[in-house]
Image (cartoon, helix red, strand yellow):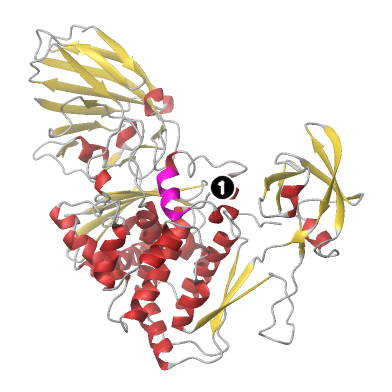
Amino acid sequence: MQLTYTLAMPTPVTHLFHVTLTVTGLEQPTAEFAMPVWTPGSYLVREYARHVQGFAAADGAGQGRPWRKIAKNRWLVETAGVDRVTLSYQVYAGELSVRTSHLDSTHGYFNGATVFMSLDGGRDLPCDLVITPFPGWRISTPLPAAAGEINRYHADNFDHLIDSPTEIGAHQVIEFEALGKPHRIAFYGHGNEDLTRLTADTQKIVETAGAIFGGLPYDDYLFIIHATERRRGGLEHRNSSSNGVVRWNFGDDKEYRQQVLALLAHEFFHVWNVKRIVPVGFLAFDYDEENYTKLLWVMEGWTSYFELLILRRAGLWTASAVLEETAQRILRLQQTPGRLLQSAEMASFDTWIKFYRPDENSQNTGISYYNKGALLGMLLDLDLRRQSGGQRCLDDVMRHCWQDYALVGRGLPEADFQAVVETVAGASLADFFERFVRGVDELPFDDLLAHAGLELRFGYQDDKPNGAADTPPARRAGLGLRVEETDGRSLISTVFADGAGAAADVAPGDELLALDGLRVTASSLNRRLDGYHPGDRVTLTLFRRDELRQAEVTLGVRPFNRLQMRPAAAVTEAQQALFSQWLHEPFPAPDFVATGDIEIESEKPKT
């Protein structure tokens, strides 16, 4: 059988991609076609078939063939007596994100899972894709061009087709070479970008990541970048990535470093970790249902850790910047009560029902496997460096996974990934995995960061010097609530399970009006609480579904929202050497301070 897809966009303002799939060489009475329900790399059933409309089927002579829908994402076509059938349908592409597809008067972008159906039994067959762009638009795709034909591309199989996001429009295209391989940046949108700087920095990221593994495992690579008003996000592919950034994040150096370069480094490291180094269950995806793994804390979490190492080694971040981001990650975890309930493994397994479906109680029952996985990776890295006297590190674990698993077509074992890491460590890691990976013990930040000569000091963002550096700041009164300003109303969005509000008649969705009879807002609440002490009893005035009510609360302790990393009072030569080897900078001076604050764009502080 031969399969040929076509994709056209005759009227972009309708947001409709027109898709056909022609199958020749049929020798069966029926043919079944299916639309994926999810896309690899984004672990949520998104029901892409809901955007399909106008389905039809015809034979080689253009005569209609009988068909019927047999499941939410499956169509059965009667093919008895014909050797050729062509499906035609339209896909509504109205959401601009890396995991969906978008078409309007400015461009077209597709993620293959959202627009292409597969032929049952034909998933491993090679196929061609013919794209008819809107007049005046160019095509940027990671698919190889078919020889001698314009706008025709070849995919080795359906997985390859799905794994090839494509940008179509009047976007800018920048080319560069890294480690002997051609690379392109397809840049859609406009803001305060400096494409010359972006290209040079992206080249450094590619070369630094490639050095970890001794080269690049592809023939060419495409970075798709959407610079819009939307939040950042990325999705990895085998020789490409889709990256969404805020259009104004290129001017300020810190924003550019954190919001743009960190995203590009993260998605690019997935070339190895996730796209080639995979859990055994990901060797062949099932596009019809969830694909479970307990290793997303490694796949995504370690990638989040390596993004920092890559940026540091490339000279794009300083050691101070790495430690500031690490401090923020530690604070984020410590402000999540769910860390005491959900392990890194179970966060990975439950991603299909939890991570991508957050609600007002999510932080009480779960964690981010990105965040905790990154911190686990860092702690393992430090421990490996200490135990081996600097002879082994997490790079060696990744190279072992690459050489002994990915290159020979093996998936990482779900049940015994611990043994994979122990092979490199040369020692048992049973206690670490049992307590911190499969269990929910507090992570040993103090102990393992001390090997690099660092100590942690928690506090509050507006703390004043107390004259004694080793004296912890006085704890402040807190309600254990997250209050957000929405349309001029101060609404409780989260009641934290480990806070004072959890024991009171306070609920998410309540509108906070007053504290002890005086008006209070989301912005003034912390200042008001500074006049109280833990253990004081206060009265909150609230609206719940327009009913005025009061709640008595005994104040608890407000969590710290600042974490500083600084050199320990006494540091050995071994500790200094480990720091320098880890972060590629000399050990800092005694007055060095890397400060992380929890008040970052993606999260509001816990009151």
Relative image position of residue 389 (x, y in whole percent): 32, 84
Q: Nearer the viewer, residue 373 or 118?
A: 373
The answer, for residue 197, to whether it is visible in the render is: no
Task: Residue under label 1, please give it.
Answer: 365
| Residue type of the residue flagged with mark 1 | Thr
Q: Quadrant of the C terminus?
A: bottom right
Identify the image quadrant of the N terminus: top left
Q: Is residue 444 left or right of residue 288?
A: right
Q: Is residue 195 above or below residue 342?
A: below
524 magenta-colored: no
The quadrant in which residue 64 appears is: top left
Check disc 1: other Cα within 10 Å, few if <14, some if 14-19, many if 20+.
Answer: some
The relative height of residue 263 versus residue 89 in the rendered view (above or below) is below
Q: Which residues are magenta?
A: 343-350
The secondary structure type at the circle numbered 1 is helix
- Does the magenta segment cover residue 345? yes
The vertical placement of 534 against 127, above or below, is below
Q: Nearer the viewer, residue 248 or 56?
A: 56
Report the predominant secondary structure element of the magenta stretch: helix
Q: Is residue 568 above or below residue 164?
A: below
Is 66 on the left or on the right of 596, as rendered? left
Please identify the quarter of the rendering in which residue 572 is found.
bottom left
Q: Is residue 219 visible?
A: yes
Q: Residue 448's spot in the image, x, y percent?
A: 46, 76
Tell me the residue at 60%/49% (across/down): 364
